[in-house]
Amino acid sequence: MSRDGFDLAVRDGLVVGPSGRRRATVYVRGGRVALVSHEHLPAAREVDASDLLVLPGMVDTHVHFMDPGDPEREDFPSGTAAAACAGVTTVIEHTHARPVRTAAELAEKREHLAGRSLVDFGLAAHAWPEHLGELEGLWRAGAAYVKAFTCSTHGVPGLDAAHLLELFRRAAAAGATCLVHCEDDSITAWAEAALRGAGREDAPVVCEWRNRDAEAAATAVTALLARRTGAAVVVAHASSPEIVELARRERREGARLLVESCPQYLLLREDELRELGPFRKFTPPARARSERELERMWDALADGRVHHVGSDHAPSTRAQKTGGSIWDVHFGLPGVDTTLPVLLDGAHAGRLSYERVVEAYAEAPARAYGLWPRKGTLRDGADADLVLVDPEARWTVRDEDVVSKAGWSPFAGRTFVGRAVATYVRGALVAEGRRVVAEPGAGAFLPGAGAEAGG
């Protein structure tokens, strides 16, 4: 590749990838990484990164921007602004309020989102019991993955074991990837009936309703069926070491099975429900009852048993979180604002390496969903998605600084070390500090791997 005519040079930063770090300059041409080198070559624009880490843009493959559907909670302009300010340059989104069950619905959503995103984005589809025959068409139309629930939640019907088996058989035949929310519907329904019957309205009811047995049972069935069908399956938002281990057993037996987890399972504890109630209502709930349990989740992330991290960004405003009983208010937390900071702080504290941060929140999710090597890496020819990080920046999370429409964070009051100071999408600056400097439309739609394979 010619070394003349670079558009951008990000100079002398500590460039970090999954396999190591080196002091180098990243040169960009035509929106792609043209060269990573210690050489000093001319460029039209230059950025001094000598005191910074230079990372590939983060790839958050599990966000809900509610657009179209419930834009009071979030929409694409606000959600992708939050992503950009936090160093996330690619998202895969699905919203349950307007599910995508057919290729036609995927096309409608893609048309609706034209010009609304600040970062590049893929779109996931939903597995619906009576629409399982749509899977191949969805995959060929460009869905990034197919999301399945094993419990009825957010208005999405759960799949029982027979439907899940059929979904996986179809996914294996089509070469599609499934992301599965694992909570057994019969167990959660039984628990809900008993708890409501007892008149329970206290916040800790959440962890008894969406209980450990329900998550473990559904994970075990999902993992077993993944192995028996050969389907590529990701266990969504694994909440505890037990869930990680259940998946690991079947993976050892040959299952094409990966585990995703989220920052809430690295930092939050079950007993916080007592004080914070609806602001800790998400599912599966926080499971940790001790610091040692949290440390075990960090260990699983550090050594790769947790394959990658997603935010599961599912915001509600403060008013929406307090507008009803604990049974009625929305599930979910805002998270895309703070996922990279949680991981950077973990690296600063020695819980994992900066290399593993890049792998877990950039390269590994990009590989899992067919976006690599275009995304998740700074190798030559990749999209020039970069995040510049000050690894020594010490700052405290404040609700008033949250970019998401939620306007609050589950980590408010915590002090983190490390944060994004600039984010580039295909070589263009989209955010600087907590300030967006681009317009919606800077981000482009990314068709899933099935669309590429199918032409």
Image: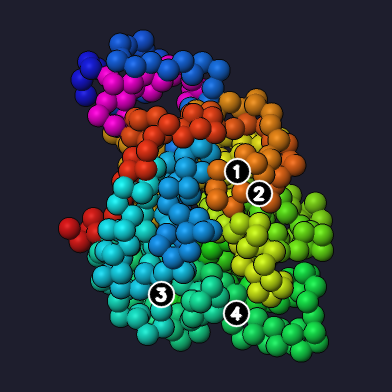
Tell me the mark number nearer the camera, choosing from 4 and 1. Answer: 1
Q: What whole-number distance in Å separates the C-alpha atoms at marks 4 and 1? A: 34 Å
Amino acid at the residue labelled 2: Ser
Left or right? Give the position of 449 relative to 396.
left
The local crowd at label 3, few if under 14, some if 14 to 19, many if 20 or more residues have their Cα within 10 Å, is many
The residue under the point 38% across, 15% down is 46
Instruction: Specify the amino acid type for callout 3.
Output: Ala
Tell me which segment is drawn in magenta: 6-33
Give above or below for 249 relative to 151: above
Q: Do tag 1 and tag 3 residues touch (Cβ < 8 Å)?
A: no
Say what secondary structure mark 3 lies in: loop
| CA neighbours of label 2 inside 10 A, class few (<14), some (14 to 19), many (20+) | many
Dot 1 amino acid type: Val
Which of the numbered marks, if any, corresponds to residue 184? Answer: 4
**In the rendered image of this protein, does residue 183 appear above or below residue 277?**
below
Q: Which mark is residue 127?
A: 3
- Magenta stretch encompasses residue 11: yes
* Gap in angstroms between the C-alphas marked 4 and 2: 29 Å
The residue depicted at 54 percent of the width and 33 percent of the height is 434
Q: Are marks 4 and 1 in contact (CB under 8 Å)?
A: no
Could you tell me which secondary element the residue under label 4 belongs to? loop
Q: Nearer the viewer, mark 1 or mark 3?
A: 1
Label pair 1/2, CB-CB below 8 angstroms: yes
Asked if one can make out residue 223 in the rendered structure from this viewpoint, the answer is no
Residue 130 bears which disc, if any?
none
Prevailing SS of the magenta stretch: strand
Residue appearing at x 37%, y 38% in the figure: 439
